Image (spheres, rainbow, N blue to C red):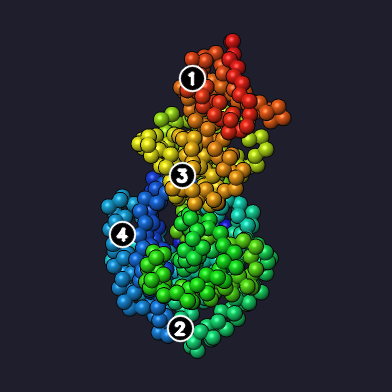
C-alpha cells in the first residue's frame, strides 16, 4: 500500500495535501490538533511546525466514549457529554490563543458508533469545528507518521493501541507501508464474553490473522504507540528501578514485558498506579492491554521494542510539514532553535563543533550528531546560577522533549554538558543515570565537555576560527594551535583548561602560537 497522502487526493479531509504548499502557510506559528479517541480526548498545541515538536499546550480528558460500544452500538452517553464539554473547552482555549482552525480527528469509537455522525454534528453546532472521522488504516498511517517524526528513516512495525482498536503499520526507509486495523483495544476486549480465557483466545485468533495479513518479517523493531503501552512501560521502569523516567525511546525486551505482566498480576493496582502516576481510568485497562502486548510479541517476535511518545497527534503535525522539513534531523533542529533563542553567541555552536571534532576521529554519524547537538547546547543554560549550572545542563538534556535520542545518548549529551561547567561528576545525584553509559562513553563525554569548556574561552565572535585542535593518538600528543589575533585570549585559565583536557585524554599537551 502507498503510505502517501498524494495517493488519495481530497479523500482525507485536512490530510488531502500538506498545508505547507504555499509560502504564506509556512508562516504559521502554532498548530492546534485534537484527537477524539475511544478512551480520551486530547488537545495539543505545537509551538511552530518545527521538526522537533514543542508542546505549547497539552491537555487530556478521559471520556471513555467507546465504553459499552460492542453491546449498545452507540457511544457511551456519559462519555459523549464529557467529550462535548471537552470540545467546547478546547475550542474556547484555541480561540484565546489565536489558533484557527483546529484540526480534529476521531478514531474507532466515533467511526463505529451508530450515533457517531450525530455526535460530530452536535460538536460542529456547538463549536463550529468539523471533526474528521478517519478509518482504521488511515489512523494507522497517521500514527506511524508520528513515529517517523521522532525517528527519521525508521524501519520496523508501529503498533498503536487505543481504547477500541489496535493498528499496525509497516515502516521502511522512512515511509509508511502496509497497514491494518483490529478490534484489540482494551475497552472493546473487556466486553468479550467468557472471562479471561475467552479474551486470551480471541486475542490469539485476531493476532495470528493480523500476522498472516501483514506478512511482516520477524525480528524487526517494534514501536509501541498509545497510552496503554506507555503505562505498561512506566510500570516496567518501576519494577526494574530504571533511573531515567523519560518514556520516549524507552527500550524493553520480551523478557522484561513477561516479568512486568506477572508483576501487574500480583500487584495492588491502586497502589501501583499511584506509585507510577497512572490515572485510575487508564489502570483499569492495563491488565487487558498486557495480554494483547504479550501475544503481539509472541507472534511478531521483534528483536527490539521501543516506546514512542509520538503518535497520531504528532503524525498530524508531520502531515503538514514540507518534505524538506521532514528530512531534517529532529535533534539538530531542536538544538539549533535553542541556540538561536537562548545562547549568548548564537551561531557559535557550529564553530565549536569544528573545534572539538578532531578529538573524535573515528566517530560514526550517530556520534557526530550527538557531539554536534552538545556544541549547539553548550551555552543555552548560562542564565542558571553558577553553582547549579552543571545540574541544569544535565537536566535539560536528559529530560527535554527531544526526538531522535536513545536514553544512553541523552545521558551522554547531559554528561558532556555537565562537564562543560565542571571537571567533577563523582558524588553527583545523577550517578545512577551515569550507569546507562559504559566507562569509555563516560570518558568521551568528559573529553567533549572539557573541550567545549576550552573552546568557549577562545571565541569572541561567531564568525572567526581563532584556534584548532590536533590530536596525534599514536604519539599521545594533543596540540592546540592559536592564531595571532586570538593569542591574547589564551591566558592562564585557558591554558589550565587545555592541560586538564589533555590529562583526561592521557595525552601530552602542546601549545602553538601562529606568528601571522
Percent of width and height locating residue 320: 48, 52
Which residue sits at x=49%, y=84%? 192
Q: 91 and 43: which one is in front? A: 43
Indicate the position of residue 355 as horizontal and vertical percent values: 57, 28
**Callout 1: helix, strand or loop?**
helix
The residue that disc 3 covers is 427
State the CA–CA distance, disc 4 to disc 2.
Answer: 33 Å
Residue picked out by circle 4? 91
Residue plotted at (40% across, 51% down)? 55
Q: Which image quarter is the N terminus in?
A: bottom right
Q: Nearer the viewer, mark 4 or mark 2?
A: 2
Is tag 1's residue or tag 4's residue first in the polypeptide sequence?
4
In the rendered image, residue 401, in percent from the top left (x then y), is placed at 45, 50
Q: Percent x, y for residue 347? A: 48, 30
**CA–CA distance between discs 3 and 2?**
53 Å
Q: Which residue is mark 2?
A: 191
Residue for badge 1: 492
Q: Residue at x 48, y 55 (%)?
A: 243
Dot 3 lies on which element? Answer: loop
Mark 3 crowdedness (10 Å alpha carbons): few <14, some 14-19, many ≥20:
few
Q: Is residue 340 visible?
A: no
**Tag in front: 1 or 4:** 1
Query: Residue 376 has which mark?
Result: none
Q: Quadrant of residue 80?
A: bottom left
Task: Give the class, few, some or many, for how many residues have Cα within 10 Å of label 2's Cα (few <14, many ≥20).
Answer: some
4 vs 3, front mark: 3
Give the quarter of the image for residue 364: top right
Amino acid at each position: 500500500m502507498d503510505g502517501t497522502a498524494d495517493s488519495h487526493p481530497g479523500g482525507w479531509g485536512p490530510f488531502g495535501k500538506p498545508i505547507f504548499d504555499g509560502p504564506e502557510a509556512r508562516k504559521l506559528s502554532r498548530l492546534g490538533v485534537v484527537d477524539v479517541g475511544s478512551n480520551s480526548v486530547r488537545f495539543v498545541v505545537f509551538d511552530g511546525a518545527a521538526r522537533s515538536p514543542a508542546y505549547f499546550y497539552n491537555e487530556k480528558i478521559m471520556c471513555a466514549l467507546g465504553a459499552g460500544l460492542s453491546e449498545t452500538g452507540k457511544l457511551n452517553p456519559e462519555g459523549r457529554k464529557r467529550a462535548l464539554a471537552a470540545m467546547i473547552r478546547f475550542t474556547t482555549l484555541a480561540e484565546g490563543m489565536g489558533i484557527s482552525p483546529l484540526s480534529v480527528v476521531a478514531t474507532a469509537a466515533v467511526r463505529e458508533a451508530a450515533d457517531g455522525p450525530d455526535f460530530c454534528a452536535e460538536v460542529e453546532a456547538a463549536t463550529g469545528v468539523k471533526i474528521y472521522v478517519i478509518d482504521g488504516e488511515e489512523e494507522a498511517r497517521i500514527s506511524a507518521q508520528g513515529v517517523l517524526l521522532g525517528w527519521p528513516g525508521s524501519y520496523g512495525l508501529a503498533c498503536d493501541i487505543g481504547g477500541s482498536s489496535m493498528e499496525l503499520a509497516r515502516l521502511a526507509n522512512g515511509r509508511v507501508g502496509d497497514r491494518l486495523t483490529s478490534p484489540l483495544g482494551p475497552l472493546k476486549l473487556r466486553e468479550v464474553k467468557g472471562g479471561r480465557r475467552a479474551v486470551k483466545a480471541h486475542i490469539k485468533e485476531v493476532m495470528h490473522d493480523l500476522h498472516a495479513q501483514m506478512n511482516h518479517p520477524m525480528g524487526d523493531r517494534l514501536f509501541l504507540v498509545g497510552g496503554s503501552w506507555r503505562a505498561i512501560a512506566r510500570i516496567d521502569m518501576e519494577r526494574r528501578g530504571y533511573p531515567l523516567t523519560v518514556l520516549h525511546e524507552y527500550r524493553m525486551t520480551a523478557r522484561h514485558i513477561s516479568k512486568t505482566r506477572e508483576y501487574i498480576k500480583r500487584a495492588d493496582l491502586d497502589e501501583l498506579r499511584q506509585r507510577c502516576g497512572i490515572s485510575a481510568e487508564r489502570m483499569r485497562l492495563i491488565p487487558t492491554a498486557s495480554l494483547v502486548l504479550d501475544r503481539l510479541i509472541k507472534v511478531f517476535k521483534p528483536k527490539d521494542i521501543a516506546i514512542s511518545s509520538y503518535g497520531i497527534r504528532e503524525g498530524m503535525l508531520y502531515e503538514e510539514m514540507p518534505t524538506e522539513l521532514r528530512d531534517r534531523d529532529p535533534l539538530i533542529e531542536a538544538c539549533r532553535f535553542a541556540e538561536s533563542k537562548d545562547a549568548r553567541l548564537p551561531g557559535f555552536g557550529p564553530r565549536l563543533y569544528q573545534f572539538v571534532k578532531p578529538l573524535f576521529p573515528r566517530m560514526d554519524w550517530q556520534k557526530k550528531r550527538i557531539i554536534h547537538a552538545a556544541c549547539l547546547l553548550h551555552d543555552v543554560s548560562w542564565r542558571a546560577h553558577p553553582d547549579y549550572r552543571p545540574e541544569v545542563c544535565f537536566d535539560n538534556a536528559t529530560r527535554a522533549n527531544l526526538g531522535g535520542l536513545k536514553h544512553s545518548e541523552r545521558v551522554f549529551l547531559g554528561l558532556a554538558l555537565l562537564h562543560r561547567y565542571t571537571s567533577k561528576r563523582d558524588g553527583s545525584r545523577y550517578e545512577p543515570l551515569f550507569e546507562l553509559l559504559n566507562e569509555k562513553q563516560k570518558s568521551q563525554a568528559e573529553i567533549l565537555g572539557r573541550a567545549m569548556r576550552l573552546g568557549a574561552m577562545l571565541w569572541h565572535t561567531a564568525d572567526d576560527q581563532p584556534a584548532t585542535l590536533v590530536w596525534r593518538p599514536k604519539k599521545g600528543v594533543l596540540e592546540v594551535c592559536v592564531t595571532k589575533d586570538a593569542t591574547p585570549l589564551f591566558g592562564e585559565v585557558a591554558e589550565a583548561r587545555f592541560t586538564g583536557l589533555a590529562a583526561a585524554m592521557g595525552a601530552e599537551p602542546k601549545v602553538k602560537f601562529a606568528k601571522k
